[in-house]
Image (cartoon, rainbow, N blue to C red):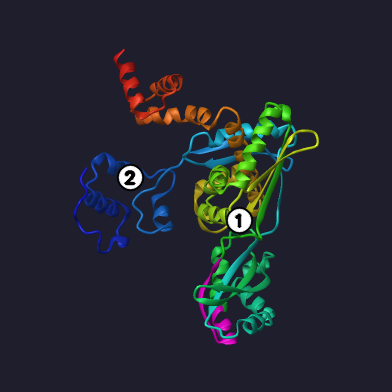
Amino acid sequence: MTISNLSSRIPGFHRMSMAERLEAVAAFAGLDDAATGQLAIPGNIDPHLADHMIENVVATLSIPIGVATNMRVDGRDVLVPMATEESSVVAAVCNSARQCHEAGGFTTSLSGNLMIAQVQLTGVSDPENARLRILERQEEIAATCDGCDPMLVRLGGGFRDLEVRIVASRGGLMVVTHLIIDTRDAMGANTVNTMAETLAPAIERWTGGRVFLRILSNLADRRLARARATWPVEAIGGAAVRDGMISAYHFAEADPYRAATHNKGIMNGVSAVVLATGNDTRAVEAGAHAYAARGGRYSSLSHWEVTAAGDLAGSIELPMPVGLVGGATKIHPTAQACLKILGVSSAAELARIIAAVGLAQNFGAMKALATTGIQKGHMALHANNVAIAAGAVGEEVARLAAILIGKRQVRQDVAAAELQRMRDA
């Protein structure tokens, strides 16, 4: 395939239909009929809906949704849909949850549904006085914020608190106002952004400064989801396995290079549920990683200890700004179906389940690392993908995957050669 030397400036591209856009892209990139036809497959979302969710739509991308079993959260057994392209993620949650199920599963809590909107004020000669002038207007600020979303107020949400910080920056001192808003069952980005933008002119009048940014913070540290669980030592393979896992945790706690991968494993589970329910994976991931560095050094999001009885106790705490209403969560039919599988009735319940999944995922990864290594289980599941990529179809996929696992060579070149041998036999 050769890339066209046509200009990427395509007049009226956003006004075209999906089919017309795809035709233009195919011509520009020199796509063959097979690639163009693949992009034209609509998946499980109506093309009309997709065309109105984002801009310049030409196709949709389907991600497998697996269901994690064995999850008991706060005394209730739940099935958890997880949207991910990565092998072994769903299996790890299932296995981890099974090993603590009889011990009670996961106990969770949530600090609240509070989101923060920031208003950045610059050019103030007396920032300390400006800070107090803003704080003195709390009642007026509350009325302005609540006036932006009367429905939220009727549902029990709205303005809750006010903070004003002085932030030293390369460009000088900034006065940063934090609006603390209870967004109830919404993630709340649009709501708090509207409040910040509405309030900005008044802050300029009160202080004589100039407002620039008016937007939420994804470090949602007033919306913390927490989960804990205990794994009986005999259920996980004994004290040696337990101690190996504790050592793995100590490594992640002490070293940011290890912590980055340790936390990525946690987010494998977290992001899969966030995506399956139509929530914002980038917001959750940004908040989680920022929270992991809140002490001035990037570290583990989870904590692991040995109980007095010798069992393994794990816990996790991380920002979880998710919702049941608004955005793709409300309009995407697959996200709605996934929420029905979960059987949740509030954003708080969803957030707590997601935290439990993150802890389960972390347990599975640490146990694999402390015993057989991460590749044994992961590559066994990945072998199917390699077999398909090599051209295997139908029953060939399982046969070829078994051969690759047996040879301990889960590689594309080996798969192609073995598939040819199978077909020549």
Q: Please identify, in this view, whether the residue under mark 1 or under mark 2 is nearer the observer.
A: 1
Which circle marks residue 173 in the picture?
A: none
Q: Is mark 2 on a helix, strand or loop?
A: helix
Q: State which quadrant residue 156 falls in.
A: bottom right
Type of amino acid at the residue the image marks with label 1: Tyr
| Residue 211 in magenta stretch | yes
| Figure quadrant of the N terminus | top left
Q: Can see residue 93?
A: no
**Quick one: 158 or 42, which is closer to the camera?**
158
Q: Is mark 1 on a helix, strand or loop?
A: helix
- The first of marks 1 and 2 along the sequence is 2
User: Which residue position is annotated with label 1?
Assistant: 291
- Is residue 381 left or right of 231 when viewed as pictured? left
**Quick one: 255 or 155, which is closer to the camera?**
255
User: Which residue position is annotated with label 2?
Assistant: 39
Q: Establish if 417 lies above or below 160.
A: above
| Figure quadrant of the C terminus | top left
Q: Can see residue 334?
A: yes
Residue ID at (77%, 38%) = 307
Q: Give the range drawn in magenta.
A: 200-216
- Is residue 358 left or right of 41 when viewed as pictured? right
Type of amino acid at the residue the image marks with label 2: Leu
Label 2: how many residues lie within 10 Å, few (<14), some (14-19) or many (20+)?
A: some
How far across and down, in percent of the image, does residue 220 sit?
A: 61, 60
How far across and down, in percent of the image, does residue 154 sit?
A: 67, 67
Residue ID at (66%, 78%) = 143
- Is residue 308 left or right of 320 when viewed as pictured? right
- Is residue 389 left or right of 148 when viewed as pictured? left
Q: Establish if 366 lies above or below 405.
A: below
How far across and down, in percent of the image, does residue 216 sit?
A: 56, 66
